[in-house]
Image: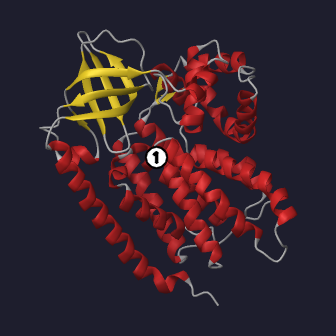
Amino acid sequence: MIKPLRQHYKYLLIGIFVVFVVNLLWKYVKYVSFVSHNQFIHAKVINQYKKPNHWVLKLKNSDIEFYTTTKDDLKDILNYQASMYVVTKYVSFWGYLTKFYAPTYKLGVFPPPTYKTFIASQHKNKKLANMYNALYFGDSLYYQTRVELSTLGLSHLFALSGLHLAVISALLYLILTPIYNRFIPPYRNRNIDLFVVILPVLLGYVYFVNFPPSLVRSFVMEVVIFAFAFALRDVFRVDILVWSVLIILALFPAFIYNIGFFLSVIGVFLIFSFFYFIKPTFISSIIILPIYLYISMFIVVHHFFGNFNVYQLLSPIFSMLFTIFYPISWVLHLVGMGGIFDDVILSYLQLGNQYENIHISSTVFYGYLMLLFILFLQMKTNKIFNFQIKML
């Protein structure tokens, strides 16, 4: 019989702490090497905006994220790969872990890869080409597009996260199951075998899009959920989120500073809280959950992003439809027909141009987080109240 995971918690904590320390020491060694002399690096341009006398660029690669400025007469190079020499003399270790400013020189820019130009070629509007490359490959969105999506409550659909990874996992499972049933003996466990096959594909995708925080959170959670299921444990436990966060911060300490990661963790906690009180069914999971998430995330999201209009109230419906739209859009782009929905999408995006600012104060925000923490304690101890709503 498999021993309960609880008996090994202290060893898991020790292991995570050791990974954190070793990882931090390794990053410090790389930092010392980085600041020893000016570095020639390749990085992706993840933000670009104009100042009166210069351009400001934000760049990122697998090791660092930083800002620089240039007086070069640049075109739109958002999401392009660039090369440059970075003056590293004044970069601190904390800046190396999170983000920093550094002067650069000899800036060079490389054209986008073929797969991105193939996606872009199917759209007459540059904004839509950018949106689909963001949806598939984690590209940065144009500023105006970010505002429109935020106003309409759709930003989470274009930030690679658990929703995207879940759809990819489900599609791979459906594709591989008939092949598995044909060639593998029936006495083997199909779910375990297919997970072992799908996991490297998902890891490859996370690596390919350069480890966005919300996608990393989703991937680690899939692994932890599998471990709980393999040990015959309940997978609707908040412990899964706790262990996932600890593992992620041990591997990526700078994520503690990332708003996207914070929002992702809060969103997943609210999903667990939903299924703590509501029995998982088709109706509760597909229809009720998106509405619950929109309402329960309102204070958190609007503390950071205040733009709102009435069309935002439709966002739960689009969250429901996205699980259908996402795989269909992949297929359409693969066959060169990705522009079918362009007119509809553009028309809806324009509704996000007009908005009001609703700013949630820090007092309300931290008060709400305190309530969520009390709910977390309830879910851990099960001593305050205990009931579950059963739905059809």
Left/right placement of residue 86 relative to residue 261 reads left
Q: Quadrant of the C terminus?
A: bottom right
- Rendering quarter of residue 314: top right
Residue lying farthest bottom? 1
Residue 383 in sight in this render: yes
Q: Quadrant of the N terminus?
A: bottom right
Q: Which residue is mark 1?
A: 211
Q: Secondary structure at mark 1?
A: loop
What residue is shown at x 55% (from left), y 35% (from top)? 137
Left/right placement of residue 189 relative to residue 243 reads right
Residue 158 in sight in this render: no
The percent position of residue 282, horizontal first and vertical second, equals: 79, 55
The percent position of residue 391, horizontal first and vertical second, equals: 78, 60
What residue is shown at x 16% (from left), y 43% (from top)? 35
- Rendering quarter of residue 385: bottom right
Dot 1 alpha-carbon crowd within 10 angstroms: few under 14, some 14 to 19, many 20 or more: some
In the displayed structure, would residue 333 be above or below residue 304? above
What residue is shown at x 35% (from left), y 67% (from top)? 19
Q: Nearer the viewer, residue 390 or 165?
A: 165
Snapshot colouring: secondary structure
Left/right placement of residue 126 relative to residue 39 reads right
The percent position of residue 350, horizontal first and vertical second, equals: 60, 16
Residue lying farthest right? 182
Tell me the kind of residue under disc 1.
Phe
